[in-house]
Amino acid sequence: MLEQILGEFKNNFSVVPVGASLARLLAAVALGGIIGLEREWRHKPAGLRTHILVCVAACLFVILGLEISQLEFGDSKEQQHDPLRMIEAVTAGVAFLAAGLIFTANGEVKNITTGASLWLSGAVGLGCGAGQMLLAALATVIVVTVLFLLRQVERLWGTH
């Protein structure tokens, strides 16, 4: 049974190879970070961490869309599931929940990064559901590392 569970984490990328997926996720970190850095400099509520999370989530949703489209859902007459609708349903539902977490208090926006991380968690959950545990794990490690490292930088700079 343990072998079967561990087998779920094998490299089962059928459309985008693991190296390309990692490169795409890291590019999302870098490019989302550039946009977020500009927002940080302008003291906007959605800054570096939030932009990175949203960019990585969007990247992950696209890769998952490509991978999920290759799953077997029966022939065209039997097919009752549209893989892209699954992604859309999760993103819309989780975005609604995440938006509910964000509020303004004393002129300051609160919980925006938590909202973005919740949205990203939806992408990770889709990855797991699609059997893309390695892809979901790569995104999780990248995001947790980004959040941890940027928190340390913020503490050093005294910005939060």
Image (cartoon, rainbow, N blue to C red):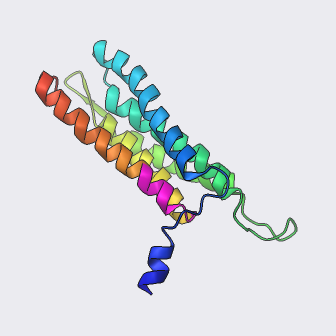
- Image coords of residue 76 (percent x, y): 86, 65
Q: In the picture shown, does residue 67 fall above or below 2?
A: above
Does residue 34 appear anywhere in the picture? yes
134 relative position to 84: left or right = left
Q: In the picture shown, does residue 8 fall above or below 158?
A: below
Identified at 71% across, 56% down, the residue is 69
Magenta span: 130-138
Classify residue 102 by image quadrant: top left
Residue lying at the far front of the rendered structure: 19
Magenta highlight on residue 131: yes
Magenta highlight on residue 19: no
Identified at 60% across, 51% down, the residue is 17
Does residue 85 appear anywhere in the picture? no
- Pick the front one: 135 or 60: 135
- Pick the front one: 136 or 77: 136
- Image coords of residue 78 (percent x, y): 83, 71
Quarter in which the N terminus is drawn: bottom left
Quarter in which the C terminus is drawn: top left
- Pick the front one: 145 or 158: 145
- Image coords of residue 20 (percent x, y): 57, 44
Q: In the picture shown, does residue 121 fall above or below 30?
A: below
- Image coords of residue 95 (percent x, y): 47, 43
Identified at 46% across, 26% down, the residue is 31
Classify residue 72 by image quadrant: bottom right
